[in-house]
Amino acid sequence: MQEIVITWGVVALLLLLALWLSWPMLRQAYNRWRMERNIASSGVEKLRDVMLDDGMGGQTYFEWLLLTPTDIRVLFTSSRYGIIFAGERMDAWAQVIGKRTIRFNNPLYTLEDSVSTLRYHLPNLTIEGNILFTGNCSFPKGRPAQVLMAGELAGQQDESASHAVQPVLEQAWDKLKGLVRKVDPATESYLLPVKEEPSYGRWGVVALLLLVMVGWLIWRYSSAL
């Protein structure tokens, strides 16, 4: 009986260590999956990571295009944490984490260019644009109207589920699907949003713990034979 307790006690300890190390990465992956699902659910149809001719010989990148009952929506995401200081006409916004300040370009300028490109192809339609901040952040000095927080997607999901899409928007969406092209990750990965990469060193330690656990079980049971 004591041998069984020792054997499975070590297994339980190794499993708990592996779970403790992998939990932040599993939670991060789950939160990203849930956010992407919520974004997709906020529209009746979606296009993701596509390019569209800007009408001036160039190409405009769109992270998300969403068809809703009342408009076609351009959506970009930004994973930021801490305190954000922002303004519609500020060239640079600031992210404060503890005593560290990180400045980044005003994302509304990129959003405006994207909305303009869409309006070039779909004139006389309602085109809306938003930046969705997906991290745990706040805007203590106020946030621009086009900035959304993660919790505000629920209302858009309810609206999409309860209303029919206007026929003129359906026709415009069909046209749009014929105009866009998918971003090629092999040659255009620089266009795609930067995602939080998992800690491969930590995953390596998790894998090592699981291998040790398997080896321990094999050794214990082969010794008992």
Image: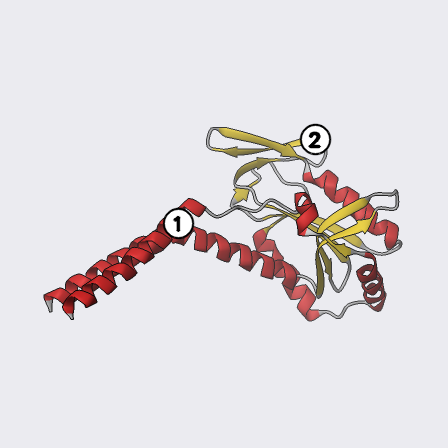
Q: In this view, does 97 lie above or below 31?
A: above
Give the secondary structure at mark 2.
Answer: loop
The amino acid type of the residue labelled 1 equals Gly
Tell me the crowding category of disc 2: few under 14, some 14 to 19, or many 20 or more residues within 10 angstroms, Cα based.
some
Query: Which image quarter is the C terminus in?
Result: bottom left
Where does label 1 land, which residue?
204
Q: Residue 113, percent across and down? A: 78, 42
Q: Residue 40, percent across and down? A: 64, 61
Left or right placement of residue 16 versus residue 135 in this view: left
- The disc, 2 or 1, on the residue closer to the chain's N-terminal end is 2
Query: Which image quarter is the N terminus in?
Result: bottom left
Would you identify the image quadrant in which residue 42 lies?
A: bottom right
The amino acid type of the residue labelled 2 equals Asp
Residue at 21% from the left image edge and 62% from the top image edge: 219
Where does label 2 land, which residue?
91
Residue at 67% from the left image edge and 50% from the top image edge: 186
Residue 70 in view of the camera: yes
